[in-house]
Image (cartoon, rainbow, N blue to C red):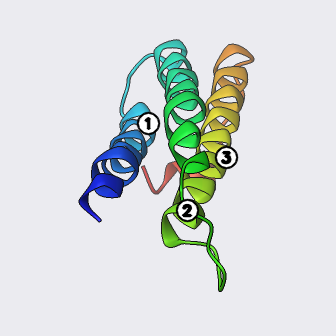
Amino acid sequence: PLHYWFTLALPGFATMFINVLSFAVYKIETAICMVIFNLFLQVIFMHDCLDELPPSVERKPNIIIFSSLLLMLTFLAIALHICLKLANDQKWQVPESVLKYT
């Protein structure tokens, strides 16, 4: 129903947009803060609402699958940003084969 759209799907799409937007931020530290804030949003708000869902007999509802995947992608975004931060701090050299695509 419409209640689940406003309480779960709409915030889910908003947090997904924040994940994508964090890769467009120039400063890596700001991007890491954005994704960690996004993780807190997901854990506090979305998973509280997921606990209130009625039980399902056949299979998991799609919104639960979507929010679980979104949580995993948020952790992946945090890991990627931390790797980018380490690469930037240690001045890793980019191979020539990668540079020709930029």
Circle 3 sits on which residue? Answer: 95
Q: Nearer the viewer, residue 1 or 62?
A: 1
| Residue at the (64%, 21%) spot, across then down | 88
| Residue at the (29%, 53%) spot, across then down | 3
Instruction: Please state which of the two labelled residues, at mark 2 or mark 1, is closer to the viewer.
Output: 2
Circle 1 sits on which residue? Answer: 23
Are dots 2 and 3 in contact, CB under 8 Å?
no
Q: Nearer the viewer, residue 43 or 2?
A: 2
Q: Nearer the viewer, residue 46 or 51?
A: 51
Across and down, in percent, residue 99 comes to 52, 48
Circle 2 sits on which residue? Answer: 54
Q: Which mark is residue 41?
A: none
Q: Answer few, some or many: residues within 10 Å of disc 3's Cα (few below 14, many 20 plus, some between 14 and 19).
A: few
Work out how far the residue at label 3 is from the one at label 1, CA to CA, in angstroms: 21 Å
In which quadrant of the rendered view does residue 77 lie?
top right
Earlier-in-chain disc, 2 versus 1: 1
Work out how far the residue at label 2 is from the one at label 3, CA to CA, in angstroms: 52 Å
Element type at mark 3: loop
Going by the image, does 51 lie left or right of 31? right
Earlier-in-chain disc, 3 versus 1: 1
The amino acid type of the residue labelled 1 equals Phe
